[in-house]
């Protein structure tokens, strides 16, 4: 009885070395497939991030020799009132733009997520502004807001909102909300697509059962739609907050920091310190601080919006 068991153990021992090369070959094949993505991350993210962190520890002029200063750039930014004012303005803009984009994106997604007549056309029309670059959209909006040749001032005068033409870009509140409205017009279609994909993944049986039980539209949206679309909503929210915190093009092109330098965002101030004042080391330190703030905000959002199953 001991002979067959001995033979089987020998056969298993002989087969074991054959499995290891196959497993190693499979691992190397998988690594080969992801190598291009890893190379892109290394070249376009990790290396620039390491270079920025290294620059932030130096006095790094645009022309000339660099000098090691350690944490001096980080100490200097604590007393930089302009940076903190720019950061506060960026946070205000982020709250306004995020609220507007998420509400508009969800409303558009609910409008076009079901197959109905002209739904494809509506989706295309709502998404078209997304393909326009921020620079082009900002130039278009600056022309529309021009007090002499633009449409907005003339339209406000025609319908009686203002007495005569008013330069809305010369007053802080109208200028701020005008730029925010432009961003919502341009980017709402992008978040519509993300949220629409989540809405279309919800089984119709849930809504039908709730409707039979007498649940109204708001009740179905609150207790069925929102819990089941949590993950796409979290993705859209993180992208929206991150994009808003990095706002630059629209305020640089339309307002150039005005009126009275009250619309300077954090990235705008980093750009000014790096490429106008030529303080590349200090600009790199500001960039690292902004990156840390974005990481903290993203982690907070992920923790608040994660599913109960993920939290266990």
Image: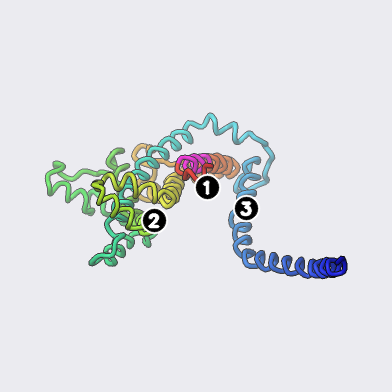
The residue wearing badge 1 is 275
Depth order, front residue of 48/222: 222
Depth order, front residue of 103/245: 103
The residue wearing badge 3 is 46
The residue wearing badge 2 is 198
Q: Earlier in the sequence, mark 1 or mark 3?
A: 3
Quarter assignment of residue 274: top right
- Badge 3: residue crowd in 10 Å (few <14, some 14–19, many ≥20): few
What stretch of residues is rendered in magenta?
Answer: 296-304
Residue at image position (42%, 51%) is 236
Q: Is residue 227 left or right of residue 169?
A: right
Q: Is residue 97 magenta?
A: no
Depth order, front residue of 225/69: 225
Residue at image position (82%, 70%) is 11
Marks 1/3: CA–CA distance? 22 Å
Q: Please state the horizontal and vertical placement of residue 235, each as a whole percent of the image.
A: 45, 51
Q: Is residue 45 left or right of residue 25?
A: left
Tell me if I can see residue 267 in this picture: no
Q: Earlier in the sequence, mark 3 or mark 2?
A: 3
Residue at image position (65%, 40%) is 57
Residues tagged 3 and 2 counted as in contact (Cβ below 8 A):
no
- Badge 2: residue crowd in 10 Å (few <14, some 14–19, many ≥20): many
Depth order, front residue of 39/218: 218
Q: Quadrant of the C terminus?
A: top right
Label count reads 3
Marks 3/2: CA–CA distance? 32 Å
Helix, strand or loop under label 3: helix
């Amino acid at each position: 009885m001991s002979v067959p068991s001995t033979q089987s153990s020998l056969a298993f021992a002989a087969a074991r070395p054959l499995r290891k090369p196959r497993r190693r070959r499979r691992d190397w094949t998988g690594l080969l497939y992801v190598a291009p993505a890893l190379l892109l991350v290394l070249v376009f993210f990790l290396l620039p991030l390491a270079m920025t962190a290294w620059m932030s520890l130096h006095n790094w002029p645009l022309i000339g020799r660099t000098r090691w200063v350690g944490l001096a750039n980080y100490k200097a930014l604590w007393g930089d009132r302009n940076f903190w004012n720019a950061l506060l303005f960026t946070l205000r803009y982020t709250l306004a733009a995020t609220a507007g984009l998420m509400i508009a994106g969800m409303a558009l997604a609910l409008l076009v997520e079901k197959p109905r007549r002209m739904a494809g056309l509506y989706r295309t029309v709502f998404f078209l502004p997304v393909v326009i670059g921020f620079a082009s959209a900002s130039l278009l909006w600056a022309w529309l807001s021009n007090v002499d040749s633009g449409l907005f001032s003339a339209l406000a005068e025609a319908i009686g909102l203002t007495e005569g033409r008013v330069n809305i870009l010369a007053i802080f509140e109208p200028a701020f909300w005008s730029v925010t409205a432009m961003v919502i017009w341009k980017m709402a279609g992008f978040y519509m697509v993300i949220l629409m994909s989540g809405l279309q993944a919800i089984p119709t049986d849930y809504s039908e059962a709730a409707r039979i039980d007498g649940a109204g539209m708001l009740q179905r949206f609150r207790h069925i739609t929102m819990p089941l679309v949590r993950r796409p909503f979290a993705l859209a929210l993180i992208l929206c907050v991150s994009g808003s915190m990095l706002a630059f093009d629209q305020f640089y092109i339309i307002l150039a920091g005005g009126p009275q330098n009250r619309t300077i965002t954090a990235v705008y101030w980093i750009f000014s310190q790096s490429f106008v004042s030529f303080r590349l080391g200090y600009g790199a330190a500001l960039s690292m601080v902004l990156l840390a703030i974005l990481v903290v905000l993203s982690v907070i959002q992920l923790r608040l919006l994660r599913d109960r199953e993920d939290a266990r």
